[in-house]
Amino acid sequence: MALQRSALVASGKSYRAEGISHRVRQINISAIKEMPLLGSRIGGCVSLGQGIPSFATPLHIVEAAFDALRGSPDTGKYSLGPGMAPLRKAVARDLNLKTGIQVDPEREICITVGAMEALAAAVLTVVDRGDEVILPSPNYASHIEQVLLAEGIPVFVPLLQSSWQLDVEAVAKAVTSKTKAIILCNPHNPTGANFRESDLRCVIKIALENNLFIIADETYDFLVYDGERHFSLAVPPEVREHLIAVFSFSKKYAMTGWRVGYVCAAEGILDQMMKIHDAVAICAPTLSQVAALAALSGPQDCVREIAGALLRRRNLTCERLDRLQEHFNYVKPMGAYYLMARFNAPHVDSMTYALRLLHEARVISIPGAAFGPEGEGHIRLSFGGTESEINEAFDRMERWLESNPFHHA
Ligand SMILES: Cc1ncc(COP(=O)(O)O)c(C=O)c1O
């Protein structure tokens, strides 16, 4: 049975097909973006949906952007394609601090329009029509659409349901002569898993043995809980010629709207990716690059504050879910700010569940099916919102569940 990944289509929207490329017809806007859109049409919704952290961009970053706009006309112009040289240098320094690796800012770094542009460019650079790409399931919805956009074939490898950790044996078994790449997001959206270093090293071994690329999405590298450590796939030197590592300023510095991230890859790979970057973006917004430079060079207390607040929100979300044990079970997230809540409504699919929760309780969640086959039976909850938003959403959910909405299911 084909999974319904689109909330808009499930809600009755039909798309024009005539004259539209097959490539585009077969992809979706991810349900992560569709559900807030549907919510905005209904009005009065509270969100556990899209991963937008509630924090304002720190003031010193905003002020640096204002100063640059006032002080230098260059701020309103294109930068060099790969990004402003001082920012690439700062990124290389930061990568060295967090992973110990040495990269050449001139040849191995490109500043991109968020992590998203880098991920799309990475997939389009290495995936040809019919190539297989291994994705954990569940997995970040946009990776699936990016593989389909490149006319590749997503090959879903289930995560271990009891922990959402990687099943490395299953990854090894999924490799065929058509496999081209593995995409791994860690810490993991949508499950909140922080993958084990030993498993990640096994995945690297599998990639090297089979001559595969690894596309590493490390958007949440700064955000792990309870004393855990994040292991970056960029660390082991042997993976260098196989790795495209993607990072973001969005969550770490509360800059989701600035649209700035970066990619690190060996020169021969990055040179090819730059063709796509040039064709679709020219460069990341210069003003946002100025802001990103201020973020990296300024005080880092803001990052600690964001991580501290998200830890409190994770604990609150878990406490509220624990009060609903009859309705949900879940694996406690150890990184990022999402969890997959498995609902106790056996004959209801996740799209129906999330749409009814939206219409009847005005709570935005994301249907698990958007994240691949193993997402079915779950809704993804984000705890990026404030504690009062989280409490309000759970108050509404509790009232809704008390009304026994799936009585007839
Ligand atoms: C796993 C993952 N990758 C990439 C992105 C996109 O990040 P950016 O805002 O840097 O494009 C997100 C945003 O939520 C994400 O969760």
Image (cartoon, rainbow, N blue to C red):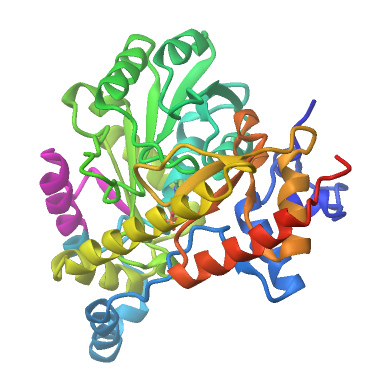
Q: Is residue 350 above or below residue 251?
A: above
Residue 123 location, x and y as percent? Answer: 49, 36
Count of residue discs: 0
Q: Is residue 103 magenta?
A: yes
Identify the residue at the far bottom of this view: 70
Q: Is residue 178 above or below residue 341?
A: above
Question: Does 130 sit left or right of 68 as displayed?
Answer: right
Q: Is residue 242 above or below residue 354?
A: above
* Residue 192 visible in the displayed image: yes
Q: Residue at x 29, y 46 (%)?
A: 224
* Residue 81 visible in the displayed image: no
What is the magenta range?
88-111
Residue 235 location, x and y as percent? Answer: 19, 32
Q: Is residue 246 above or below residue 236?
A: below
Q: Residue at x 63, y 41 (%)?
A: 326
Residue 115 location, x and y as percent? Answer: 41, 51
Q: Quadrant of the C terminus?
A: top right
* Residue in the foreground of this view, choosing between 27 and 314: 314
Q: Residue at x 32, y 64 (%)?
A: 309
